[in-house]
Image: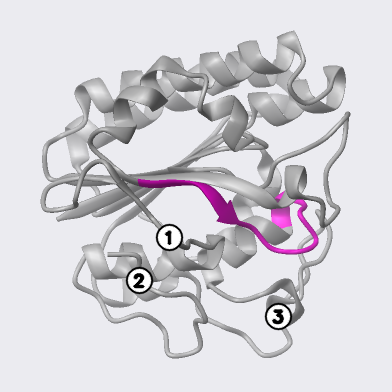
């Protein structure tokens, strides 16, 4: 089996629950609208915790500026590449380049949301992901969609422009799923939520994220009783038949 993680930046569960595509996915997914992220609920620390399965206190990145690890913990891509698995990244926020160490990716596609607009580059990275997945079928792929977070900061979480950005992100997800080869398991999630025009606090609106997990052999219409952003990396390794790093703190959700 292969796996793809699709992350919609800043997508609150109550926003995801209003999307028709998400409603349909609940019927075929193991899912929760009550998964937890880490503190601080900020984009880069949350992504580092997703890929390294530890709290920010351990990986050391506590702001949107990457901090080299004092006691390095292998990330998901390093573990997978060490097991001879091919990994591919598609993203429109440049700071995510530090999630994978040099040599651990076989393909990477970046389009600058800050320069070209996150709305436009959401579609660009989706198109690139669809092409690469169909033509090359990497063992693991990560697709990051940053438009909804930008809309939240500009207009406010749960505002009309924010909800439209979430909808367009789900349109991108639908595009990927419509062309995805059958051997892929899919994880759809967010890094954090948000409130007003911000995030980063420990309030429920910031700390709660959705998570959908589906694919061959994964139970559908099953609500997960507990899930944490740190559980995603060990779940991906389990899907690919690879041992997780012993330093990881998360649990396999399968």
Q: Is residue 119 above or below residue 227?
A: above
> Is residue 24 toward the left or the right of residue 229 in the image?
left
Q: Say if the magenta span includes residue 64.
A: no
Label ID, residue 253: none
Residues in magenta, as a range: 31-44
141 relative to 211 in the view: left or right: left
Per the image, the residue denoted by label 1 is 225
User: On the picture, is 67 further left or further right than 239?
Assistant: right
Q: Quadrant of the N terminus?
A: bottom left
The quarter of the rendered structure image containing the C terminus is bottom left
Residue 199 placement (x, y as % from top left): 83, 43
Asked which secondary structure carries label 2, the reply is loop
**Which residue is labeled 3 in the image?**
69
Mark nearest the camera among 1 and 2 is 1
Alpha carbons under labels 1 and 3: distance apart: 32 Å
The answer to whether the residue labelled 1 contacts the one labelled 3, judged by CB atoms less than 8 Å apart, is: no
Give the spatial CA distance, label 3 vs label 2.
Answer: 24 Å
Q: What residue would you read off at disc 2?
A: 252
Q: Position of residue 201 (x, y in %)?
A: 86, 53
Whole-percent x, y for residue 128 in the image: 39, 27
Residue appearing at x 67%, y 21% in the figure: 118
Q: Is residue 35 magenta?
A: yes
Q: Quadrant of residue 62?
A: bottom right
Q: CA distance from mark 1 to mark 2?
A: 13 Å
Most foreground residue, 3 or 13: 13
Label 2 Cα neighbours within 10 Å, binned few <14 / some 14-19 / many ≥20: some
């Amino acid at each position: 089996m292969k796996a793809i993680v699709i992350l919609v930046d800043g997508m609150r569960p109550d926003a995801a629950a209003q999307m028709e595509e998400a409603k349909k996915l609940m019927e075929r997914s193991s899912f929760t609208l009550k998964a937890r992220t880490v503190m601080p609920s900020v984009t880069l620390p949350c992504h580092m915790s997703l890929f390294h399965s530890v709290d920010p206190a351990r990986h050391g990145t506590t702001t949107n500026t990457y901090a080299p690890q004092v006691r390095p913990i292998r990330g998901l891509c390093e573990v997978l590449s060490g097991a001879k698995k091919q990994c591919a990244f598609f993203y429109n926020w440049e700071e995510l380049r530090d999630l994978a160490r040099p040599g651990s990716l076989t393909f990477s596609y970046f389009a600058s949301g800050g320069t070209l607009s996150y709305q436009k580059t959401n579609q660009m990275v989706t198109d690139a992901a669809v092409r690469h997945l169909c033509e090359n079928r990497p063992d693991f792929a990560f697709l990051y969609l940053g438009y909804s977070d930008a809309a939240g900061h500009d207009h406010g979480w749960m505002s009309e422009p924010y909800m439209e950005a979430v909808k367009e992100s789900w349109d991108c997800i639908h595009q990927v799923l419509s062309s995805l080869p059958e051997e892929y398991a899919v994880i759809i999630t967010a890094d954090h939520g948000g409130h007003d025009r911000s995030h980063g606090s420990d309030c429920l609106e910031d700390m709660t994220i959705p998570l959908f997990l589906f694919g061959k052999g994964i139970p559908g219409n099953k609500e997960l009783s507990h899930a944490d952003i740190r559980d995603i990396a060990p779940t991906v390794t389990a899907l690919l038949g690879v041992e997780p790093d012993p330093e990881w703190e998360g649990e396999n959700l399968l």
